Image (spheres, rainbow, N blue to C red):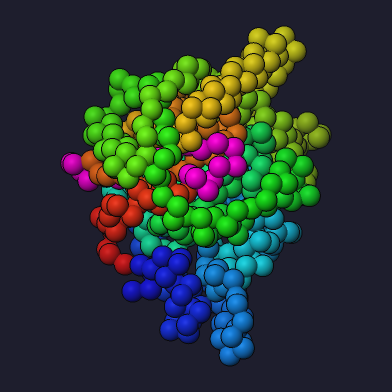
């Protein structure tokens, strides 16, 4: 069945003419229809529009074949989009009631780049409202279920993006990662999720949660697919002042360089009590595999790790409270009228935002308020600098850092919704990477025994070191077959 293919395999078949883009899109539509009632990864699907784009791609593919000209490897491939990335003419809702009915008037830069590469934006993927959460239970439209166990969460906030790939509803998707939202769901759903270096991928057209932390990145079945997508979406963008004018390496070509001679650091602060022993075991075995391929393993220390979660929840909420001020009932989406402007604003926000979003806006406003700014926000910025320094010092000794992506495998829906603190602690291994602005990837490295649930290996790399990150991930993936396993709670594709 077509839906089983990787992006690379599908691309080859499209280019040779063995399958058409229309077939590929139709296969996704059929798969969504058969499994999404159980998984609920999609908020909506643009069936007719995607099929039309597929027909146009099929013409381009045919012309390239006839004239023997080169054509982008993404031509004709549908890519799922998290509901906070702008696609012109598509809903842009951030899984929030406050943006109900809002249609994006323009394309995000990543969307434009994907379209220019011939890819087809496919559907709107469920998420925690405004990307705030670790389980997708904060969506205003109901939670997404993990394809490995429908009573389990897929992780968050990009739960829909991860679950759609794991359920083979689409070949690849885009998500966003502010504190782990790509890597934690990738780990819970058994796919490959990459958070690029801050500044590598344009944020233009990504609805901002915490602007100094947000990055867009791909979800795929394989590391090679991740490289293909990263290459397509990366690059300097004058429309995003934080995007960096760094050249974009040929990630796919550089994949096969191996790990011989690479130094991989194991931070002692990441192998903690309270971590599932099966997770620790799987990650330690993965590190041994890298060692057997010629990497040198070095113990390192990231001494300020303990402060990462609290630092993040001050900085991220502060930025969110400012970013979300724009949803006031006048400019976007929902409006609840009132007798005056204040009433209109507060009613719209009161009814439009969910509980977690309100909690963050309150927290963020508090830490920015004049009496507390120095004690909280300023202090958090200083700690952030120390966390960055930890990584800087570590990367003087090692090329990459290996850790678990999460302390446990996927947890049951409902288990943490009433306990925000325990939900926040889910991101203990992923948050520092965003605070430091470095790059990270999560890929499958084993399964728990009962029930069988995916475990994620996280690799962290230097700023703009995605090539090395992908090389190590690729070398590991080639030596294992974790990604050939299919999610068990839904029919095989
Ligand atoms: N779970 C974290 C939070 O709730 C991270 C979310 C994200 O990366 N978007 O803030």
Image x and y of residue 246, in percent: 69, 46
Q: In this view of the protein, which residue sits in the foreground, 6 or 67?
A: 67
Q: Return the residue found at the far front.
A: 261
Residue 404 lies in the magenta stretch: no
State the image quarter where residue 297 is shown. Answer: top left
In the image, residue 319 above or below residue 272: below
Asked if one can make out residue 364 in the rendered structure from this viewpoint, the answer is yes
State the image quarter where residue 360 is shown. Answer: top right
Range of residues picked out in magenta: 449-469
Q: Return the residue found at the far bottom.
A: 66
* 273 displayed left or right of 6: left
State the image quarter where residue 377 is shown. Answer: top right
Marker count (numbered): 0
Residue at image location 55% in from the left, 74% down from the top:
76
Q: Which image quarter is the N terminus in? A: bottom left
Q: Return the residue found at the far right.
A: 340
In the image, residue 116 above or below residue 41: below
Residue at image location 48% in from the left, 84% down from the top:
17
* 260 displayed left or right of 279: right
Residue at image location 52% in from the left, 29% down from the top:
395
Asked if one can make out residue 209 in the rendered structure from this viewpoint, the answer is no
Image x and y of residue 232, in percent: 60, 59
Q: Which image quarter is the C terminus in? A: bottom left
* 257 displayed left or right of 404: right
Image x and y of residue 183, in percent: 45, 42
């Amino acid at each position: 069945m077509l839906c089983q293919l990787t992006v690379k395999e599908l691309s080859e078949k499209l280019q040779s003419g063995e399958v058409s883009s229309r077939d590929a899109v139709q296969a996704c539509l059929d798969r969504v229809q058969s499994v999404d009632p159980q998984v609920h990864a999609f908020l909506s699907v643009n069936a007719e529009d995607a099929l039309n784009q597929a027909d146009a791609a099929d013409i381009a593919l045919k012309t390239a074949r006839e004239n023997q000209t080169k054509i982008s490897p993404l031509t004709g491939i549908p890519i799922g989009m998290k509901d906070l990335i702008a696609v012109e003419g598509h809903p842009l809702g951030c899984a929030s009631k406050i943006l109900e009915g809002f249609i994006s008037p323009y394309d995000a830069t990543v969307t434009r780049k994907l379209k220019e590469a011939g890819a087809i934006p496919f559907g709107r993927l469920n998420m925690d409202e405004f990307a705030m959460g670790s389980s997708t239970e904060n969506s205003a439209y109901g939670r997404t279920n993990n394809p490995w166990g429908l009573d389990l969460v897929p992780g968050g906030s990009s739960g829909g993006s991860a679950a759609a790939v794991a359920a083979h509803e689409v070949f690849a998707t885009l998500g966003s990662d502010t504190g782990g939202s790509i890597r934690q769901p990738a780990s819970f759903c058994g796919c490959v999720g990459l958070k690029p270096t801050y500044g590598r991928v344009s944020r233009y057209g990504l609805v901002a949660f915490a602007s100094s932390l947000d990055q867009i990145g791909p979800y795929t079945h394989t590391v090679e697919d991740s490289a293909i997508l990263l290459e397509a979406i990366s690059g300097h963008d004058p429309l995003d002042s934080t995007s960096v004018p760094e050249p974009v390496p040929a990630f796919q070509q550089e994949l096969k360089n191996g790990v011989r001679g690479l130094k991989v650091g194991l931070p002692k602060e990441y192998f903690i009590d309270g971590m599932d022993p099966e997770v620790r075991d799987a990650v330690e075995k993965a590190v041994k595999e890298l060692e057997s391929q010629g990497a040198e393993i070095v113990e390192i220390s990231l001494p300020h790790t303990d402060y990462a979660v609290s630092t993040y929840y001050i900085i991220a909420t502060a930025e969110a409270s400012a970013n979300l001020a724009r949803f006031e009932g006048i400019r976007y989406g929902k409006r609840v009228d009132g007798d005056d402007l204040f009433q209109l604003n507060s009613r719209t926000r009161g009814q439009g935002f969910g509980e977690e979003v309100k909690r963050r806006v309150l927290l963020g406003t508090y830490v920015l308020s004049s009496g507390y700014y120095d004690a909280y926000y300023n202090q958090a910025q200083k700690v952030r600098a120390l966390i960055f320094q930890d990584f800087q010092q570590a990367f003087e000794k090692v090329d990459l850092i290996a850790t678990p992506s999460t302390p446990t495998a996927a947890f049951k829906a409902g288990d943490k919704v009433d306990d925000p603190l325990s939900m926040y602690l889910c991101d203990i291994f992923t948050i520092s990477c965003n605070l430091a602005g470095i790059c990270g990837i999560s890929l499958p490295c084993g399964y728990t025994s009962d029930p069988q649930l995916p475990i994620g290996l996280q690799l962290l790399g230097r700023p703009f070191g995605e090539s090395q990150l992908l090389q190590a991930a690729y070398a590991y993936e080639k030596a294992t077959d974790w990604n050939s396993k299919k999610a068990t709670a839904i029919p095989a594709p």
